[in-house]
Amino acid sequence: MNRFSFRDHSRTMAATLAVVCGLLIVGCSRQTATQTPEVLRLGVDAGAMEDAPIFVAEAKGFWKDEHLNVEIRPFASGRLALDALIGNGVDAATASDIPVVFAAYHKHPVRIITTFSDSARDISMLARRDRGILKPQDLRGKKIALPLGTAAEYVMDMFLNRNNIARSAVTVVGLQAPDTVPALIRGDVDAVFGWQPYIYNGQQRLGANAVVVTSEGIYSEPFNIIVLDSALTARAEFLTKLLRGLEKAVEFTKSNRQDAITIVAAKLGIEVKTADAIWDYYSFQSVLRPSLASSLRDEGVWAKQAGIEKPDATEPPYESLVSDAIQRRLR
């Protein structure tokens, strides 16, 4: 006797349909995953001219060409972007070399994988002439605003050292980079140390009352992409795509100056003529300079001498802070 009922047949059909639908869903999911670009969170100094190639790469879709979705996370400084990297808030960060030294002193496994911008004129002193400041030697007894833990603090100390002014002879006010120039304009402080385009905009607002001295001859600021050591292997493919798109952006800035300036001005919220006036302060290329580890060591010594790090603090392994692992994948 055939014991196969309509109910059994219905159950069999339902099971078959469930399997088929499941396979279709898996197949569609795999297809979607293949089509969806990989995501990488990049923390940047949202107000820095040094980040120009980053802004160009995003605007021109160079990372999308690499099937990489780079989510730009804005911060008030590279130091804050690096803090977010250490806290796993982003996957990579852009910053100068100075915050890297501080992070390394505190045992954070940070690694510079490329330098994409360099400038000896980005970090500058902007002072008020009516406060009796005509040159760095006049800073003694003055109130100075700057973003602490950044290249601006390093340059200020170099200015003071070269002019035999003890740090205790000035009053240092820690402010975020966007807040320094407004404080100077209001007269809350006598001078500021910072970067472009804040310095240029402040100079224009102060007019004849402005005194500007760049860091040329004292410090050339490398702007870098920094990751955690674990990412060099765990996210090597992502980072390779990141650098490949960045290299395209660097080449674009070199061969399409005006288009690049227009893109960067729009991103920074400044006039095109402002970006054009300071554009030649920068050298854009994706490299790892042999001298970078040595510079980090010199800055580590300064951090102790300035009292920012304890005299008995263990020196970081400076050579290990620079890694060419991702650069080598591009060759």
Image (spheres, rainbow, N blue to C red):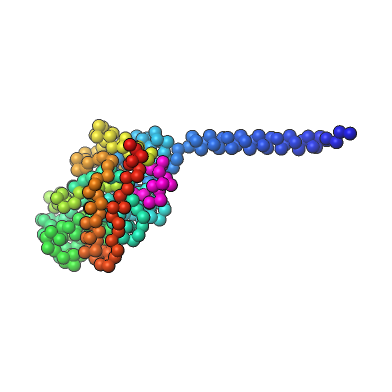
What x and y, as percent, mark residue 132?
11, 59
Work out which residue is located at the far top of the displayed protein and give it.
255
Q: Is residue 159 above or below residue 26?
A: below
The answer to whether residue 232 is magenta is yes
The answer to whether residue 99 shows anywhere in this view is no
Residue 114 location, quadrant: top left
* Residue 134 relative to residue 294: left or right: left
In the rendered view, does 170 fall on the left or right side of 12?
A: left
Residue 187, percent from left and from top: 20, 59
Q: Is residue 257 magenta?
A: no
Residue at point 40% right, 43% down? 236
User: Residue 177 versus residue 29: which sits nearer the camera?
Assistant: 29
Relative to the observer, which residue lies in front, 56 or 273?
56
Please state, as top left, top right, bottom left or bottom right, where the C terminus lies in the image.
Answer: top left
The residue lying at 11 percent from left, 56 percent from top is: 135
The stretch in magenta equals 226-239
- Left or right of 78 on screen, residue 90: right
Residue nearest the viewer, comparing 78 with 241 = 241
- Report whether residue 14 is seen: yes
**Image coordinates for residue 99, horizontal then vertical, percent:** 29, 55
- Which residue is more in the foreground, 234 or 16? 234
Picture coordinates of residue 75, whole percent (x, y): 34, 51
Please name the residue shown 31% across and 52% down the image: 320
For the N terminus, give its image quadrant.
top right
Quadrant in the rendering for residue 267: top left
Name the residue rendered at 28%, 61% in the picture.
315
**Up-down relation of residue 100 to residue 244 (above or below):** below
